[in-house]
Amino acid sequence: MSAINLHEPVPAELRTSEFVLRPITAEDAAMDHDAVMETRENLRLWEQSSWPEDDFTVEANRADLVDLEERHAAGRAYTYAVLDPLGTECLGCVYLFPTEATFLTKTTVTPVGDDAWADVQAVVYFWARQSRMETGMDGRLLSALRTWFAEAWKLERTVFVTNEQFTQQVDLIERTDLTRRFELVEPGKAGTYLVYG
């Protein structure tokens, strides 16, 4: 089973009445930084790290985004900014990885049932900024992503990952018809990552 088909052009955007997804760029550093810092407590649970630190700067964020932009252009993994329809406010981010991504190859994967990790076509992580989670936008984003990956990306076996300690996102996913397929343990990180498909 192949991972994300890197030989096909990947979809350029997802547009709904509430948000637009497009590839993130270094030029998004300031508005992405604003969303990251507003959401930092959730992101620390999601990342299982101290990122973003309280003194995380726009310039440090720009350096991160340069790397994400290059990775996207090279087809190694894909990162989309979630923006308001006018493109003036960052509402979150979506990350799409093949199972062969370097960090995933170092992860201990435990199936919950009969699913095989080798059959997974894409591994998705996402977050929405705190103020938009309070309006339920993260649920609408998840729903839109599921349709987008199935219809525009033609992916049949996409999984969504969150950390067990990010209980708000766990609860969100578990209110859908997605079921837990795998558990991941990353070296040096506390908390198990839960994988739904």
Image (tube, rainbow, N blue to C red):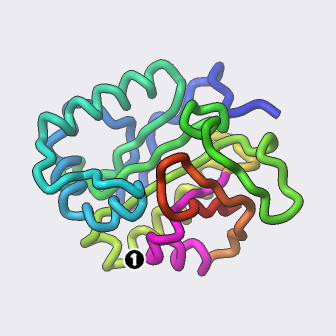
Residue that appears at 68% across and 28% down: 5
Farthest residue toward the right? 114
Task: Name the residue type under label 1.
Answer: Gly
Residue that appears at 44% across and 49% down: 94
Residue 176, placed above or below residue 65: below
Residue underneath mark 1: 136
- The residue nearer to you, when weighing 151 against 23, is 23
Does residue 85 show up? Answer: no
Q: Does the magenta stretch include residue 143?
A: no
Farthest residue toward the front? 188
| Apparent side of residue 102 relative to residue 23 in the rendered image (left or right) | right
- The residue nearer to you, when weighing 184 against 137, is 184
Does residue 13 show up? Answer: yes
Position of the C terminus, as image quadrant, is bottom right
Residue that appears at 55% across and 65% down: 143
Position of the N terminus, as image quadrant, is top right
Quarter of the rendering containing residue 2 = top right
Span colored in magenta = 159-175
| Apparent side of residue 166 relative to residue 157 in the rendered image (left or right) | left
Residue 8, placed above or below residue 197: above
> Residue 70's spot in the image, x, y percent?
38, 22
- The residue nearer to you, when weighing 166 against 71, is 166
| Apparent side of residue 113 relative to residue 29 in the rendered image (left or right) | right
Neighbourhood count class around disc 1 (C-alpha, 10 Å): few under 14, some 14–19, many 20 upward: few
Q: Does the magenta stretch include residue 167?
A: yes
Task: For mark 1, give the secondary structure.
Answer: loop
> Residue 135's spot in the image, x, y percent?
33, 78
Residue 28, placed above or below residue 92: above
